[in-house]
Image: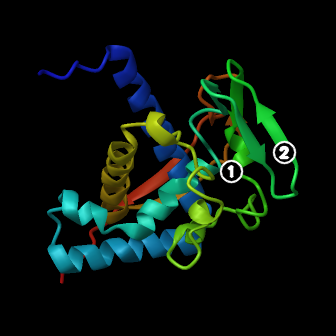
């Protein structure tokens, strides 16, 4: 059986979400010198270990960069997810309240609210990629549905791993080859678009550099 080819619209959407997330990742990193230094150091160690020929398995080792790309928590590709209820069920809150969700209703899951619950994400307004590192793993602290920027369950995004890999390719190359500085103010989110994008221009200066392999 031949798998159906993805539509042109879906491919365009993937390009838009990846380019937008890449921009947010860069804007956050260039606004936080400590985390920028950490990902640059990771690239130096990768190059020392493998040289400059980066492949799929090596990209998987870039855990620090991976955590930084989870800027998606603060800048998700959509404001809400919607699901139709096919079977009635009960929701129990941590306060002990019960809610019945009837069959046939539509559930709206506000991603920005979910990603900023203080009982799950400490200081949710702070960009802190270490919250996703082993020992904290706040994206799993409230269960498998507390970090749903790619959806969840059987309808989660099939392109999640591809998206992370694509953005890693972009930023690992930039971090290895350029010194970057954000010269424009950190952008606000433009809510006039279906997918919240940076408002205005994100201006960066760059200077060529080379991460030594020895």
* Horizontal and vertical percent position of residue 73: 61, 51
Q: Is residue 12 above or below residue 93?
A: above
Q: Nearer the viewer, residue 58 or 42?
A: 58
Q: Residue at x 30, y 56 (%)?
A: 173
The disc at residue 98 is: 2
Q: Residues within 10 Å of mark 2 (few under 14, many from 20)?
A: few
Q: Which residue is mark 1?
A: 115
* Horizontal and vertical percent position of residue 201: 59, 36
Q: Is residue 41 left or right of residue 196?
A: left
* Horizontal and vertical percent position of residue 118: 79, 61
Q: Determine the image quadrant of residue 176.
A: bottom left
Q: Is residue 21 left or right of residue 56?
A: right
The disc at residue 141 is: none
Q: Determine the image quadrant of residue 80.
A: top right
Q: Is residue 213 visible?
A: no
* Horizontal and vertical percent position of residue 42: 37, 74
Q: CA distance from mark 2 to mark 1?
A: 22 Å
Whichever of labels 2 and 1 marks the residue nearer the N terminus, that label is 2
Q: Nearer the viewer, residue 14 or 144?
A: 144
Callout 2 secondary element: strand
Q: Residue at x 62, y 44 (%)?
A: 75
Q: Is residue 35 left or right of residue 171?
A: right
Q: Residue at x 84, y 45 (%)?
A: 98
Furthest residue toward bottom = 214
Quadrant where the N terminus is found in the figure: top left
Q: Is residue 110 above or below residue 166?
A: above
């Amino acid at each position: 059986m031949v798998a159906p080819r993805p539509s042109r619209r879906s491919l365009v959407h993937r390009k838009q979400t990846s380019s937008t997330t890449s921009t947010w990742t860069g804007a956050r990193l260039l606004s936080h010198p400590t985390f920028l230094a950490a990902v640059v150091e990771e690239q130096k160690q990768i190059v020392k270990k493998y040289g400059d020929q980066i492949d799929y398995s090596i990209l998987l080792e870039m855990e620090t960069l991976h955590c930084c790309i989870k800027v998606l928590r603060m800048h998700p590709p959509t404001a809400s997810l919607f699901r139709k209820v096919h079977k009635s069920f009960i929701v129990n809150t941590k306060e002990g309240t019960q809610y019945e969700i009837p069959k046939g209703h539509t559930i709206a899951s506000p991603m920005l609210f979910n990603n900023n619950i203080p009982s799950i994400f400490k200081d949710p307004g702070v960009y802190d990629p270490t919250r996703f590192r082993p020992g904290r793993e706040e994206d799993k602290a409230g269960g498998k549905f507390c970090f749903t920027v790619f959806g969840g369950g059987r309808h989660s995004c099939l392109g999640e791993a591809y998206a992370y890999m694509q953005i890693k390719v972009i930023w690992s190359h930039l971090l290895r080859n350029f010194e970057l500085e954000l010269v424009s103010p950190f952008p606000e989110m433009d809510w006039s678009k279906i997918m919240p994008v940076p408002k205005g221009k994100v201006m960066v200066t760059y200077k060529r550099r080379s991460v030594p392999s020895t």
